[in-house]
Image (cartoon, rainbow, N blue to C red):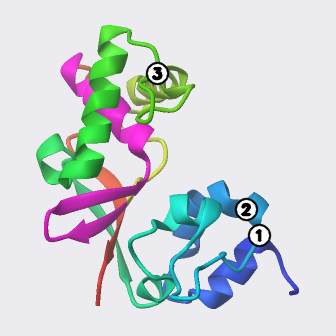
Amino acid sequence: MPGTFYDQAAAALPNFPREVIDLWFWHAEPAGWPPAVTPQGYPTAIWGNVLGRARAFSFWTSVSWTLGRIQLTPGLLEPETGSFVTAAANGFLAGLPPIPNLTTRDYGRRIANNVVALQRLSHLARRPVLLSTSAGLEVLDGTHRIAALFVAQSLRIRLDPLHEVWIANAT
C-alpha cells in the first residue's frame, strides 16, 4: 500500500480528524495498517488494545468527531476507564509502585511529566481522545494525561478550568 501508516489510516477512516489518528494510533504503528481483525471484524493483538476488543472495526467507520472544551472530572468518565484513571492518580499521589494488570511500568514517570507540563501550561499538552457512551466518557487515549490532571487538581495547581478534548460520538 502506498503512503505512510498514518496516510493509510486517514484514507480508510475519512471520518477521523488527522490529529486523532496521530494521537491515538501511534501505539499500533509497529503492527501496520490495516488493523488485524477476527473473522467477525473485531480488532486483535495490539489493535485490540488500541481500538478495543468489544467493538467491530466497522463501528469506527461510522463515528463522528467533535473538538470540544470541557471541565474534566472523574464523574464524567464511564466506570471502567474512570476507575483506571482514578486508581493511577491515587497510586501516584500515594507513591505506589505500578499496579499489576492496571497501570503501566512507567505510569509514575508519565504522570509526573504531565503534571510538570500542566504546571507550565495550565492545560493539557495534548488533547485526550474520548468516546461518548451512555455510561459516560470512555478514555480512548490520554489516560495518563487525565490522571495527571486529577493529580494537579488535587494538589490545587492553578489550571484552566476547561480542557480541549476530541470526542467520538456513535452515529
Residue 115 rendering spot, x and y as whole percentages: 41, 24
Q: Residue at x 45, y 82 (%)?
A: 56
What secondary structure is marked by label 1?
loop
**Amino acid at circle 2:** Glu
Please name the residue shown 22% across and 46% down the image. Answer: 72
Q: Residue 53 appears at what percent x and percent y?
A: 45, 68
Residue 142 located left or right of residue 77: right
Label 1, label 2: how many angstroms apart (C-alpha)? 5 Å
Residue 159 shows in the view: no
Check contact, mark 1 vs mark 2: CB within 8 A: yes
Residue marked by disc 2: 29
- Given residues 4 and 98, the one toward you in this image is 98
Crowd band around label 1 with a 10 angstrom C-alpha radius: few (<14), some (14–19), many (20+) = some
* Residue numbers of the magenta segment: 130-155
Viewport quadrant of the C terminus: bottom left
Could you say whether the residue bearing mark 2 is in a helix, strand or loop? Answer: helix
Residue 143 is situated, as x and y percent measured from the top left of the image, at: 40, 43
- Could you tell me the amino acid type at mark 1? Gly
Name the residue furthest front.
39
Q: Depth check: 22 or 29 in front?
A: 29
Q: What's the residue type where badge 3 is placed?
A: Pro
Query: Contact, CB < 8 Å: mark 3 with mark 2?
Result: no
Residue that label 1 marks: 32
Residue 154: name its quadrant. top left
Residue 50 visible at all: yes
Choose mark 3 or mark 2, whichever is in front.
3
Q: Which residue is mark 3?
A: 98
Q: Give the spatial CA distance, label 3 vs label 2.
A: 25 Å
Residue drawn at 73 percent across, 79 percent down: 7
* Residue 131 colored in magenta in the image: yes
